[in-house]
Image (cartoon, rainbow, N blue to C red):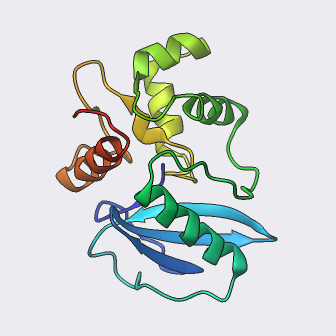
């Protein structure tokens, strides 16, 4: 999962749209009729102001994200650009099999994939389509683990919101 935050050296500000949702703001990039990137934006991300979009795809994304916020059982149906390495795509496919209201530990995901927990964490961190591809459903052996490559309060608050919304007691 990609996140633009205070620890990024040069946060991007050239989003096609910035969507404000109950869990925070998402930067959106799309091209050629497909989503290319969604990124959680830090509350103080410079230049990332909400912007209306003329794109039908961005409007549909926003509608589906609002539907998810109203009902955690909402199933996303949006065109996603081909992104990531073969391994990352395997991890992301596994994430999509974790039912709402459930979590999987990094180590268990690694065993299923014949990999290592850190590699699974790296693929989660690189996920360009969160929350559509639910990397928040992967947790550490002794707690939440990290989120968006961070253990900072704002990142973990976002992960807790998503998990609680989906019925996970955290």
State the image coordinates of residue 126 (x, y, percent, origin top left). 53, 46
Residue at 44% x, 48% y: name it: 72
Residue at 42% x, 59% y: name it: 70
The residue positioned farthest toward the left in the image shown: 153
On the rendered structure, is 16 left or right of 55? left
Q: Quadrant of residue 154?
A: bottom left
State the image coordinates of residue 161 (x, y, percent, origin top left). 28, 50
Residue at 30% x, 38% y: name it: 146
Q: Quadrant of residue 112?
A: top right
In this rendering, is residue 170 above or below 109?
A: below
State the image coordinates of residue 151 (x, y, percent, origin top left). 24, 43
On the rendered structure, is 59 left or right of 131? right
Q: Quarter of the image for the C terminus: give it.
A: top left
State the image coordinates of residue 121 (x, y, percent, origin top left). 44, 32
Residue at 56% x, 51% y: name it: 132
On the rendered structure, is 77 left or right of 40? right
In this rendering, is residue 38 above or below 127?
A: below
Nearer-the-camera pick, 26 or 68: 68
The residue positioned farthest toward the right in the image shown: 32
Q: Quadrant of residue 44?
A: bottom left
Tell how many labels.
Answer: 0
């Amino acid at each position: 999962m990609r996140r633009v935050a205070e620890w990024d050296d040069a946060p991007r500000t050239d989003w096609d749209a910035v969507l404000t949702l109950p869990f925070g703001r998402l930067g959106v990039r799309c091209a050629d009729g497909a989503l290319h990137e969604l990124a959680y934006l830090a509350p103080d991300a410079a230049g990332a102001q909400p912007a209306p979009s003329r794109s039908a795809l961005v409007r549909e994304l926003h509608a589906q994200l609002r539907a998810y916020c109203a009902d955690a059982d909402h199933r996303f149906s949006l065109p996603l650009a081909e992104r990531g390495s073969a391994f990352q795509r395997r991890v992301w496919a596994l994430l999509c099999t974790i039912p709402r209201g459930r979590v999987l530990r990094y180590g268990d995901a690694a065993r299923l994939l014949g990999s290592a927990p850190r590699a699974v964490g790296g693929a989660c961190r690189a996920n360009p389509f969160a929350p559509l591809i639910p990397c928040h459903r992967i947790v550490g052996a002794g707690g939440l683990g990290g989120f968006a490559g961070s253990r900072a309060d704002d990142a973990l608050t976002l992960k807790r919101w998503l998990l609680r919304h989906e019925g996970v007691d955290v």
